[in-house]
């Protein structure tokens, strides 16, 4: 499965990349806006997307844009924002579900396994 992770926190990005590279899946990590646009244009099988990117809630805009262009694969919000309002905003933006930070490698593995079947 081809995964794109859009994350502006380099430490978080490295940890997720290390885990995914230890599996049969492939990952592209985008830490800059232009990288994210290019990676997402490749229609990955799964998108992991931070919500607060570059000091704004740009993750919502990326998710909306993907859905508007017909992207139907899962988009997972990876975020520390976990209130009911945040959950509702993510659903409205087109996210499939949320992975709340901090998360364990086991939680990440379970999520990826669920969508790789």
Image: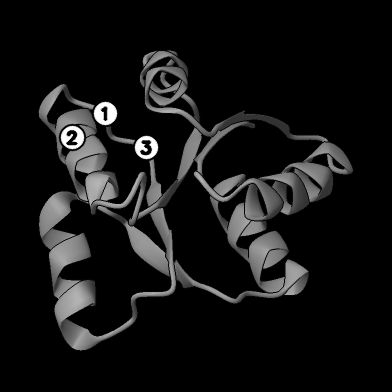
Residue 40's x, y, as percent? Answer: 40, 23
Q: Examine the rendered structure and indicate whether residue 63 appears above or below residue 85.
A: above
Viewer-closest of 89 and 114:
89
Disc 2 marks which residue? Answer: 67
Residue 9's x, y, as percent? Answer: 56, 50
Tell me the residue at 74%/34% (across/down).
Answer: 25
Tell me the residue at 64%/46% (across/down).
Answer: 10
In this rendering, the label closer to the viewer, 3 or 2:
2
Residue 65's x, y, as percent? Answer: 16, 31
Tell me the residue at 15%/52% (across/down).
Answer: 93
Q: Quadrant of the rendered structure where residue 79 is?
A: bottom left
Disc 1 marks which residue? Answer: 71
Label 2 Cα crowd, 10 Å radius (few <14 / some 14-19 / many 20+): some
First-in-chain label (3 vs 2): 2
Q: Examine the rendered structure and indicate whether residue 8 appears above or below residue 12.
A: above
C-alpha separation, residue under disc 3 versus residue under disc 1:
6 Å
Which of the labelled discs sits on residue 73, or is there none? 3
Q: Give SS at disc 3.
A: loop
Q: Examine the rendered structure and indicate whether residue 17 appears above or below residue 82.
A: above
Kindly check if marks 3 and 1 are in contact, taking CB atoms under 8 A apart as contact.
yes
Q: Give SS at disc 1.
A: loop
Tell me the residue at 64%/32% (across/down).
Answer: 1
Which residue occupies the extreme front position in the image? 55
Kindly check if marks 1 and 2 are in contact, taking CB atoms under 8 A apart as contact.
yes
């Amino acid at each position: 499965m081809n995964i794109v992770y859009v994350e502006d926190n380099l430490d978080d990005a490295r940890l997720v990349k290390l885990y995914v590279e230890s599996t049969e899946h492939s990952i592209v990590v985008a830490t800059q806006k232009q990288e994210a646009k290019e990676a997402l244009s490749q229609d990955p099988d799964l998108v992991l997307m931070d919500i607060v990117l570059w000091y704004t809630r740009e993750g919502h805009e990326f998710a909306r844009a993907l859905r508007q262009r017909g992207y139907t694969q899962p988009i997972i919000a990876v975020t520390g924002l976990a209130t009911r309002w945040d959950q509702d905003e993510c659903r409205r933006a087109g996210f499939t579900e949320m992975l709340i930070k901090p998360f364990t490698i086991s939680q990440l593995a379970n999520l990826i396994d669920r969508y790789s079947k």
